[in-house]
Image (cartoon, rainbow, N blue to C red):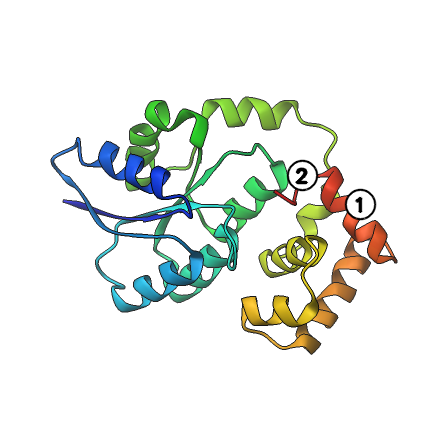
Amino acid sequence: MTNFLIVDDHDIIRDGIKTLLETRPNYTVLNSCSSGEDAYRFVSQHPENIDIILMDITMDGYGGLEASRRILKRNPKQKIIIMTMHDNPVLIDQAFKLGSLGFISKNALTQDLFNGIEHVLNKQIFISPKLKLSVKNKKDFDKKLTQLTTRELEILKLVASGNKMDKVAETLHISKKTIANNISIIKSKLDIESDFELFSITIKNNLII
């Protein structure tokens, strides 16, 4: 029996994935969560029961990357498949750096979901063919962004989305001082100085989604 946790902030997508999974007699959906925070809490309470987490990458609060980072820090062996509507090379690169084994396009769930699951169960990396082709053809993203850690990337996205420092600190459960220090490090890594440049680079690379 293979047990799943589904994490997505859209009810219709969670229900659709659950319906797909339950067409297989040996697949069981233990729970579905609408946020990264809920997912982390559930995993903390059921550390031994979840075989695969299907994780949306774009959610309010913890994004899929931040939730995955926290979960994998707690349990490095946890198998995670990231789901996305977007073919962003930076986010895909971060997902695999964290230790996620799969990256599936939501536009190809019915075609790729079961293939991706079988790869990940066998500890093999899987990326949807459509995403792989799209990323291969995308040459205009800023490669400096791949220098950022998952925490730094999440802070960058939240700040550039217009969130005040208090809100970012509250969302990520870290201090405002830590946020400010991380922003300085981000600017240094990206070789930029102003908040406007920070905002511009996120827009150019489709990080605000």
* Residue under label 2: 206
Instruction: Give me the disc on residue 134.
Output: none
Task: Pinpoint residue 173: horizontal percent, then vertical percent.
Answer: 54, 72
Label 1 Cα crowd, 10 Å radius (few <14 / some 14-19 / many 20+): few
Q: Quadrant of residue 26?
A: top left
Q: Farthest residue in the front direction? A: 11
| Point 57% across, 47% down: residue | 94
Q: Helix, strand or loop at disc 1? A: helix
Instruction: Give me the disc on residue 200.
Output: 1
Task: Pinpoint residue 35: horizontal percent, then vertical percent.
Answer: 42, 56
Residue 99 is at least partly visible in this image: yes
120 displayed left or right of 46: right
Measured along the vertical axis of the image, is residue 93 above or below residue 108?
A: below
Q: Farthest residue in the left direction? A: 25
| Point 18% across, 36% down: residue | 22
At label 2, which amino acid type do we have?
Answer: Asn
Task: Pinpoint residue 99: horizontal percent, then vertical percent.
Answer: 46, 50
Q: Quadrant of the N terminus?
A: top left
Label 2 Cα crowd, 10 Å radius (few <14 / some 14-19 / many 20+): some
| Point 43% across, 32% down: residue | 106
Q: Nearer the viewer, residue 91 or 136?
A: 91
Q: Quadrant of residue 14?
A: top left
Task: Pinpoint residue 165: horizontal percent, then vertical percent.
Answer: 69, 69
Q: Could you give the CA–CA distance between mark 1 and mark 2, rounded to whole angstroms?
A: 10 Å
Q: Helix, strand or loop at disc 2? A: loop
Measured along the vertical axis of the image, is residue 127 above or below residue 168?
A: above
At label 1, which amino acid type do we have?
Answer: Ser
Q: Farthest residue in the right direction? A: 193
Q: Nearer the viewer, residue 202 or 89?
A: 202
| Point 83% across, 57% down: residue | 195
Residue 142 is at least partly visible in this image: no
Q: Quadrant of the C terminus?
A: top right
